[in-house]
Amino acid sequence: MKSKLVASPSEVYVWPDPQGVVRWQAIAPLYRSVPQAASNDPKLYALLSLIDAIRVGRVREQRLTASELEKRIVAL
């Protein structure tokens, strides 16, 4: 999804995390424990990343991401 959604480096978001190694624009996680929980579960990370793309994206990105999120949830 990253290749479809990210137009420029200024549109890359990360969750603030003291253990993190990447520095970009911060987005507050839905819950304080999200970065730690997502680091232990790749599927959870992917789903939460899609939700955040809906939160910060423009209409085009929101539609693409919502469609992808729906596919992944149905597959669970």
Image: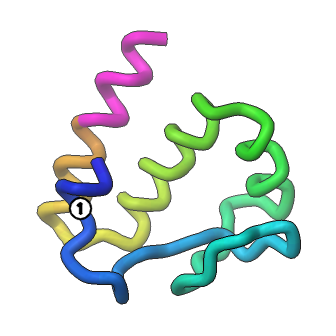
> Residue at the location (13% across, 62% down)?
60
Most prominent secondary structure in the magenta stretch?
helix
Task: Give the SS element for disc 1.
Answer: helix
Establish if 74 lies above or below 24. above
* Of the pair 8 and 35, the residue shown nearer to us: 8
Establish if 50 lies above or below 54. above
Establish if 50 lies above or below 8. above
The reply to whether the magenta stretch includes residue 22 is no
Colour pattern: rainbow
Q: Quadrant of residue 54?
A: bottom left
Residue annotated with mark 1: 5
Q: Which segment did they paint magenta?
A: 68-76
Q: Amino acid at mark 1?
A: Leu
Q: Residues within 10 Å of mark 1 (few under 14, many from 20)?
A: some
User: Can you give x and y, in whole percent of width and height, for residue 4 in the image?
Assistant: 18, 55
* Of the pair 12 and 64, the residue shown nearer to us: 12
User: Can you give x and y, in whole percent of width and height, for residue 26 in the image?
Assistant: 60, 82
> Residue at the location (19% across, 48% down)?
64
> Residue at the location (51% across, 40% down)?
46
